[in-house]
Image (tube, rainbow, N blue to C red):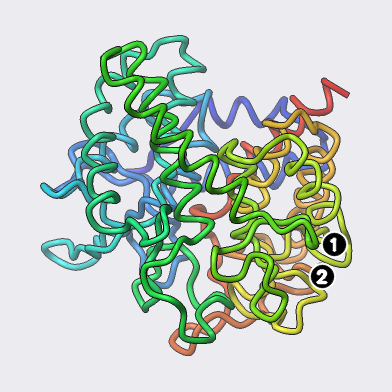
Amino acid sequence: MRFILNKLEKEVKALSRPEWRPLLDYVAKLHGRSIHMPRFPLKYPWEEIGPGYFNSPAFGHWDIIHSVLDSLPAEPEHCRWQLLNNLSMQQPNGLIPGSLWMKSSPPEWNLKGHPPIWVYAVDEYCRLNNDYSFAAECFESLERNIKWYEKNRQSDDGGFFYTFDGAWESGIDEGIRFDSELPGRRTAVDATSHVYWLYDHAARWAAMIRPAATDKYRKKANELKDLIRNQLFDSETGFFHDIWSANKPELRMLSFEGFWPIVTGAASHEQAQQVIDRNLLNPERFFTPHPIATVAVNDPRFEPRMWRGPAWNSITYWAAVGCVRYERYDAAAKLLERALDASTKQFIRTGTIWEFYDAMGNEPEKLHRKVAYDQPCKDYLGHNPLIAMARLWEECTAKL
């Protein structure tokens, strides 16, 4: 059965610059091609990572959130189904598994987590529909997810960490942080920012749903915000780092994980401006021909291999969201426009979208992935919220 997201296809016909429309129309149709009928354990029609994924079909937390953001606000019911499918995978201990491999029978679970960005998508659904009843429906899942992180990923120095192993629960396969043996239970900038986001959403939702819990979650959010601002920011780089490398030049790395404090709102206004001006818009670091590079181009570890240099449109989207949070509409527009132009260029040349792109604007099929499948996958939706990017570009340019 082929699904058609009529409202999404209609939206892209009127969206943004005409030269982007063939790409966006292709993406809208690809969303429809990626939807399957309900199948255990997913109760609703479900959208896979993308038919070109080498391990297709698969349903993934990190990926489905980007697809949801792409389809909002045109297809709210479809997006709600995907969010409920995602939360239906939550384990009794509160963990939301990172992936569900649907090509096996029965489906095979990857019982490791991915970054808990799902709360942002739920919040966006509620904001766009001006109705927070869905947040109330998800509140118990949020509290259980928080308890899992507090029990299993709380660091010894006040923040949170991700495990540094082949499970890639940080969402970053083989990133440069994994090149050396790292401290075990020590505060990582991305994990701590993500749990801050959980607390922040819990505090805001509780104010509407369960007011007695508001102060508890706001206190926890503020404690993490203070830690991030005071211990993870390095004034020499104007960037955020893991606690073991902040203010330690011999250990510092410039990789995109340091942007998460501006995405989640944990950074101060002054810190955010430094992150944006000295890093995001700096062509010697992250503002590449196809932004953003996952590793700064002036870092000796930059290379044309996944998560070690190439550009992922999903990460560019999050960086732009961070810019908007601090009212830097100019920066967000520059990032989004350049990424959409570069993606369009490759779409015209190859007729597809790619899992990740060459940050220098060269051919993505020449990049390296992994030994088992050594190039970016084609028709990969999970990291290509290109419609959401075009929509956000329009919103930003309207404010300039």
Q: Amino acid at mark 2?
A: Met
- Which residue occupies 18% across, 38% down? 43
- Which residue occupies 85% across, 62% down? 289
* Residue 105 in picture, x, y percent from top left: 13, 65
Closest to the observer, 135 or 129: 135
* SS at badge 1: loop
Looking at the image, residue 271 lies above or below residue 290 = above
Closest to the observer, 275 or 138: 275
Disc nearer the start of the sequence (2/1) = 1
* Residue 248 in picture, x, y percent from top left: 67, 73
Q: Are marks 2 and 1 in contact (CB under 8 Å)?
A: yes
Q: Quadrant of residue 390?
A: top right
Instruction: Compute the Cα span from label 2 to label 1.
Output: 5 Å
* SS at badge 2: loop
Closest to the observer, 141 or 65: 141
* Residue 161 in picture, x, y percent from top left: 40, 61
Tell me, for residue 176, which label it has, or none.
none
- Whether residue 375 is visible: yes
Q: Which residue is mark 2?
A: 360
- Which residue occupies 80% across, 41% down? 273
Where does the C terminus fall, quadrant-wise? top right
Looking at the image, residue 338 lies above or below residue 76 = below
Where does the N terminus fall, quadrant-wise? top left
Tell me, for residue 289, which label it has, or none.
1
Q: Residues within 10 Å of mark 2 (few under 14, many from 20)?
A: many
- Whether residue 40 is visible: no
